[in-house]
């Protein structure tokens, strides 16, 4: 790990000023940053430790019905907040399906949004990676890429965004509050992450010094609480990144879908909102045929970036299943295995 | 640049000067405080061997900078037993053979204690398995680990009931 | 190292013998309190930290290292490179015996595999050494990397495993196939796997003049000591290795590898104690792995489901510079009674660290292929897989015709199947679902592992206070040597276990042989048994030859040792305590040595194997393809069980390795660079707690008078065999999809809805 200056600002304004310098990065829990620094994937000159700042670790219920989550709230504290989990069950389920209990206790809301890809070629400093070193090339193309992107990728980069949390958040129109050199602003979470294009090193809409201070879920997001699920297919029952995941949320009125929200994880460089699929579900009955149609719409633009054509079919099937589970209703208690296809296994076997 | 920091480790306050901000909590415990019960299995948050409680919560000490945890209260495997009196989780791990080589064991035990305090799993074996999945055991002692946690959980539930009665 | 404070608490009732009792681990308190000292926990005064820099290419040579940049980093003391290092006494490329493997200890600039050590940075802190290794910024001349099972011309290696013939046959394979009513011709692939013990390889090396103190996990103290002695040109008695606990070994800590040697060199270079610990990613290269295989099985069966031929060919790889060949096909020698059996191997060379023994080397890889093929043939014959196996039950070892020294496999099948409920299994696949709509499948596999013996020696003593001593340089890597061997020792000297000072884990004790091949308890146990018998015999001589003793005249064989006393066999009321005998003789202690070794005559006469039957249930999401094992039952017959509690744990562990083999483990290598792209524990998956279902182990009673004096067959490795195939066969039974490439991946199961 490269030597760095350690700065502990006393205020958000001090933090922004300190982090605006070239080579500076924010340190929150460090669960992703330290991993990257230990692998020499990233070698910052200055760490601006925001963990001692006041006022960033609260969950507030605002007068307009929205919920504002401080950037330093831990993943575990958010998921286990009973009010929050009741209102946004798919978000809680996604949080609890990610990483391990230890990591969720440490990792923050802001950090989760900004976690870097798990692409092996990004991590492997002996390989070429346009994201790690702009213009060096992409060894993932033509390499071991069965887990890579099927949507929104470019010849420069086929990496995916690994967050589970972001998937239901983007489906529910979450907003990110940012403190920057120009003061406070906010953007839709959907606008936070960038697709790679020809500049995969630019991963987000953040400018130097920008600090995510909170994430907000609007009042309308609560209206899906009784029909919201997150589903995640992985290669280990727990403690594994998503091969493909989906968040599905439905507002069902009089047996018809009044409004649908759908997003996919593990398929692109950003959490992938599937608006075309949402549109076909609006106003129809929650049937298998409707969900199939939505799944086809969601993956219309998908194409393999390597040995991963199967992920397109898998994504379709996950969409159908996630919608089916959402339509069946949010369970009263989160399953023992959150977001797992084995969540509801009861045991009895029929020939 | 030197940084003065202060930690409470297993109940005792430790003040010291950190000459390098790169030192992780894990390496601080192992290499500088010589509390080597906490193990380094992967150093990347992927195995759980380094699990300790920080302010009562289980975390991977390998992915925590010591300097950032200035003022924190740390509990490690060395801080559990009271003299010869083992913590119920420690005793249950022995009784249920919840380990073989023992290298992941301090992390498993700290994780189990952290999990009980989180009160999410209760005595449901499936939830315990899920909530203990951040601690790899290559020897494959998972069955004993789950049994040990169930027994310790039961004992602690009983103790709590007696206290509240 | 302070005296180990071992304990048998909480105590358990014992009935006579210590052997057979489910004692809890005597090192348990140390391990649950964090007081068990693993190698990297040592910190002698003045110790420096060494970190290895490894190659970023798989083939070529290092053309430059920025040593100056590394040395400029504060705290860096020295950088060891091919141009700046202590000289070794012998060339590390010379194989001085069959258990010596070539290692990279900076003898040249050549790079022969990715993650090969190319320099060592020594510094005052771990942080400085770690960054120093990065600052070396090596440059390379890169040559094309040889990768995979088709990397080049194949060849037939002279031997596979440790001296096994490359080819074996009995009967006429082609005739057997030609006469068959049903034929299976299937090819299976297994990936490279890495041991990934939780404890990374570590060494603390400390030179004091010519004396060398080493803390290092090793499964072979004596072999490691001999290797260090020859590499550094020092006498054996100048070296002291301590290995009281291994944080897992699984074969990767059996033989001396390059990294610990680099630690000893670094300590010599700087004249201070040095600690060198591998980073997790550095364990994917210089410390061995399980080689990939491609196995073709051709089976023939007659109209009644009797095998007519079994042809098993395995392609594997070795490194470009040394030889270890996974003996995958050899598992077909022993299990099924085909009149014609042929096993053969070939190999290619690739740019990889040399493959090595990894828990059940050959048996694990071979078993998943053989058990899959047997399952395929049972289906082809329209037979239940257990019925098919029973139909082809081998009453004698098929390839050799030798009788088995013992074989309770039939009982394993019966008891395992009964416990599992196998009789209710529908023959057709894809017939069962659970309440949630998940596909359910049941599969089985036969487990087998040879009952091996190596060489070991032990020293026993009886002290004047009536207590005993047993010394043997045995290794506890989790299997429970501190407990199981102490149990054998206690019986051997006729004392309660708490009255025997059992010493193990250091190189100054008698050579216990290697802890591998599932043979450590048998081998070390035999030595302990023999040393105990010898010391009791000496004690008996003292008593029976002394007319003041109540045992006078009883003769050497006329007494038995029990609870610290010798008593007359023909009159148990007459006897005296060990301390009385020694006090009267005026002797502080009597001592004796004993050995354990294979008996060539028995080996000639008998086929000696442990056996078992494993039954697995899996659930598979019908649309999404994700698999979860929901229960497993294993019934194993492995001779005498010394400690049922720890044997159960060992067998559980093996079954989990089998599950992992079928569903999880795979080192993914980039075909262009030869680099392993998942050299970590996040993406190289081993099972987590939630992957492991309720497990059930039955240890089937088995008495084997031939394998060794104690009748022990060993349980360390057999659990993997059978289990991997059982899980794979259950996946087929659940889905109707036969996957022949392991681990079974989601995409393989998406083919059908």
Image: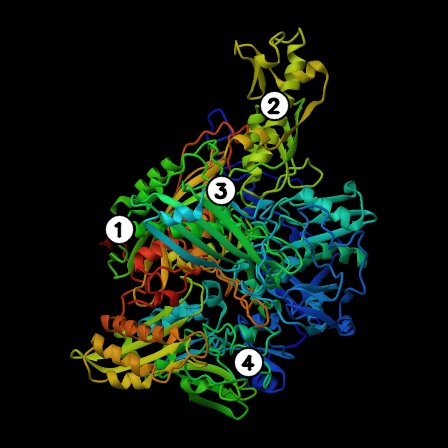
**Image: C133 above or below A8:** above
Are discs 2 and 4 both within one chain? no
Determine the residue positioned at 31% across, 76% down. Answer: A248
Q: Position of residue B1 (x, y in %)?
A: 71, 74
Determine the CA span between mark 3 and mark 2.
29 Å
Q: Position of residue B112 (x, y in %)?
A: 46, 54
Are discs 2 and 1 both within one chain? yes
- Which chain is home to disc 1? C
Determine the residue positioned at 41% across, 85% down. Answer: A190
Q: Earlier in the sequence, mark 2 or mark 1?
A: 1
Residue C576, quarter of picture: top right
- Which chain is home to disc 4? A
- Please, what secondary structure does the residue beneath circle 2 have? helix
Determine the CA span between mark 4 and mark 3.
46 Å
Note whether residue C630 is visible: no
Q: Are marks 3 and 1 in contact (CB under 8 Å)?
A: no
**Residue C427 badge:** 1
């Amino acid at each position: 790990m490269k030597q760095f200056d350690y700065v502990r600002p006393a205020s958000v304004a001090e933090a922004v000023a300190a982090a605006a310098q070239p080579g500076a990065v924010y340190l929150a829990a460090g669960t992703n940053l330290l991993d990257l620094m230990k692998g020499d994937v990233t070698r910052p000159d200055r760490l601006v430790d925001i963990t001692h700042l006041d006022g960033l670790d609260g969950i507030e219920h605002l007068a307009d019905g929205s919920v504002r989550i401080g950037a330093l709230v831990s993943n575990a504290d958010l998921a286990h907040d009973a009010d929050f989990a009741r209102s946004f069950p798919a978000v809680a389920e996604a949080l609890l399906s990610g990483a391990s209990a230890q990591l969720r206790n440490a990792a923050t809301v802001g950090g989760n949004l900004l976690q870097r890809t798990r692409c092996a070629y990004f991590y492997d400093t002996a390989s070429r990676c346009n994201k790690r070193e702009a213009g060096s090339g992409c060894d993932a193309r033509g390499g071991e890429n069965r887990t890579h992107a099927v949507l929104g990728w470019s010849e420069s980069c086929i990496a995916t965004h690994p967050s589970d949390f972001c998937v239901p958040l983007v489906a529910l129109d979450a907003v990110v509050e940012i403190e920057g050199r120009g003061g406070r602003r906010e953007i839709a979470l959907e606008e936070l992450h960038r697709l790679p294009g020809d500049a995969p090193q630019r991963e987000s809409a953040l400018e130097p010094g920008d600090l995510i201070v909170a994430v907000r879920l609007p009042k309308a997001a609560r209206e899906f609480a009784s029909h919201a699920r997150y589903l995640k297919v992985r290669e280990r029952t727990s403690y594994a990144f998503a091969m493909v995941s989906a968040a599905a949320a439905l507002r069902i009125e009089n047996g018809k879908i009044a409004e649908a929200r759908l997003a996919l994880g593990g398929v692109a460089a950003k959490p992938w909102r599937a608006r075309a699929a949402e549109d076909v579900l609006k106003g129809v009955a929650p049937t298998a045929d409707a969900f199939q149609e939505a799944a086809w719409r969601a993956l219309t633009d998908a194409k393999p970036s390597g040995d991963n054509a199967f992920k397109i079919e898998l994504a379709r099937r996950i969409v159908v299943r996630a919608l089916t589970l959402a339509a069946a209703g949010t369970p009263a208690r989160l399953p023992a295995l959150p977001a797992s296809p084995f969540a509801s296994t009861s045991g009895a076997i029929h020939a | 640049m030197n940084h003065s920091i202060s930690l409470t480790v297993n109940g005792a306050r430790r003040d010291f000067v950190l000459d390098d901000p790169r030192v992780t909590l894990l390496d601080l415990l192992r290499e500088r405080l010589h509390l080597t019960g906490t193990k380094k299995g992967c150093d990347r948050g992927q195995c759980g061997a380094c699990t300790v409680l920080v302010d009562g919560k289980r975390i991977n000490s390998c992915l925590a900078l010591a300097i950032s945890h200035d003022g924190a209260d740390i509990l490690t495997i060395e801080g559990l037993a009271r003299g010869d009196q083992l913590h119920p989780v420690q005793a249950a791990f022995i009784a249920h053979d919840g380990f073989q080589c023992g290298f992941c064991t301090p992390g498993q035990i700290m994780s189990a204690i952290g999990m009980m305090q989180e009160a999410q799993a209760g005595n449901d074996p499936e939830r315990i398995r899920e909530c203990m999945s951040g601690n790899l055991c290559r020897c494959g002692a998972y069955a004993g680990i789950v049994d040990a946690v169930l027994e310790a959980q039961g004992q602690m539930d009983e103790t709590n009931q007696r206290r509240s009665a | 190292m302070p005296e180990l404070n071992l304990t048998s608490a909480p105590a358990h009732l014992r009935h006579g013998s210590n052997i057979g009792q489910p004692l809890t681990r005597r090192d348990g308190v140390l391990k649950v309190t964090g007081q068990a000292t693993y190698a990297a926990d040592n910190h002698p005064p003045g110790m420096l930290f060494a970190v290895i820099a490894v190659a970023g290419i798989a083939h070529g040579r290092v053309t430059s290292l920025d040593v100056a940049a590394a040395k400029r980093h504060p705290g860096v003391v020295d950088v060891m490179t091919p141009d700046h290092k202590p000289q070794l006494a012998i060339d590390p490329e010379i194989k001085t015996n069959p258990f010596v493997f070539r290692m990279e200890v900076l003898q040249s600039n050549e790079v022969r595999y990715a993650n090969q050590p190319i320099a060592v940075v020594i510094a005052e802190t771990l942080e400085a050494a770690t960054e120093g290794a990065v600052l070396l910024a090596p440059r390379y001349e890169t040559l094309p990397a040889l990768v995979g099972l088709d990397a080049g011309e194949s060849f037939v290696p002279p031997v596979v495993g440790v001296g096994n013939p490359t080819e074996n046959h009995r009967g006429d394979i082609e005739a057997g196939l030609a006469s068959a009513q049903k034929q299976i011709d299937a090819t299976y692939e297994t990936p490279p796997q890495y041991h990934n013990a939780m404890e990374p390889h570590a060494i603390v090396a400390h030179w004091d003049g010519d004396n060398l103190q080493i803390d290092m996990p090793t499964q072979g103290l004596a072999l490691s000591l001999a290797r260090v002695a020859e590499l550094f040109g020092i006498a054996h008695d100048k070296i002291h290795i301590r290995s009281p606990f291994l944080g897992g070994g699984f074969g990767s800590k059996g033989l001396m590898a390059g990294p610990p040697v680099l630690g000893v060199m670094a300590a010599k270079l700087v004249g201070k104690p040095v600690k060198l610990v591998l980073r997790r990613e550095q364990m994917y290269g210089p410390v061995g792995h399980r080689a990939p295989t491609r196995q073709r099985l051709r089976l023939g069966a007659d109209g009644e489901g009797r095998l007519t031929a079994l042809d098993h060919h395995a392609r594997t790889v070795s490194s470009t510079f040394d030889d270890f060949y996974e003996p995958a096909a050899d598992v077909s020698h022993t299990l099924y009674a085909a009149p014609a059996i042929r096993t053969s191997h070939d190999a290619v060379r690739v740019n990889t660290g040399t493959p090595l023994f990894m828990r059940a080397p050959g048996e694990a890889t071979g078993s998943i292929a053989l058990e899959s093929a047997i399952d395929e043939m049972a289906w082809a014959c329209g037979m239940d897989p257990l019925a098919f196996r029973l139909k082809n039950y081998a009453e004698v070892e098929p390839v050799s015709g030798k009788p088995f020294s013992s074989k309770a496999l039939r009982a394993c099948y019966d008891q395992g199947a009964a416990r599992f409920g196998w009789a209710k299994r529908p023959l057709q696949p894809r017939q069962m679902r659970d309440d949630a709509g998940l596909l359910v499948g049941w599969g089985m596999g036969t487990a087998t592992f040879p009952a091996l013996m190596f060489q070991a020696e032990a020293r026993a003593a009886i002290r004047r206070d009536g207590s005993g001593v047993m010394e043997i340089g045995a290794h506890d890597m989790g299997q429970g040597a501190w407990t199981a061997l102490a149990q054998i020792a206690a019986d051997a000297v006729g004392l309660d276990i708490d009255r025997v000072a059992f010493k193990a884990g250091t190189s100054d004790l008698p050579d216990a042989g290697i802890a591998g091949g599932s043979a450590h308890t048998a081998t070390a146990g035999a030595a302990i048994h023999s040393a105990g018998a010898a010391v009791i015999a000496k004690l008996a001589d003292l008593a029976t030859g002394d007319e003041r003793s109540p045992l006078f005249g009883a003769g050497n064989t006329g007494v038995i040792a029990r609870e610290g006393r010798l008593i007359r066999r023909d009159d148990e009321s007459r006897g005296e305590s060990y301390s009385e005998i020694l006090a009267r003789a005026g002797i502080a202690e009597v001592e004796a040595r004993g050995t354990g070794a294979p008996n060539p005559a028995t080996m000639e006469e008998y086929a000696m194997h442990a056996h078992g039957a494993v039954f697995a249930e899996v659930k598979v999401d019908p649309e999404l393809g994700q698999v979860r094992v929901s229960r497993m039952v294993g019934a194993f017959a492995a001779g005498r069980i010394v400690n049922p509690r720890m044997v159960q744990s060992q067998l559980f562990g093996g079954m989990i390795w089998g599950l992992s083999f079928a569903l999880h483990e795979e080192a993914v290598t980039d075909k262009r660079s030869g680099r392993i792209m998942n050299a970590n524990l996040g993406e190289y998956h081993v099972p987590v707690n939630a992957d492991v279902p309720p497990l059930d182990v039955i240890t089937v009673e088995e008495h084997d008078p031939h394998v060794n004096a104690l009748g022990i067959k060993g349980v360390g490795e057999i659990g993997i065999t059978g289990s991997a195939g059982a899980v794979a066969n259950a996946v087929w039974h659940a889905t109707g999809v036969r996957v022949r490439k392991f681990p079974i991946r989601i995409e393989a199961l998406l083919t059908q809805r």
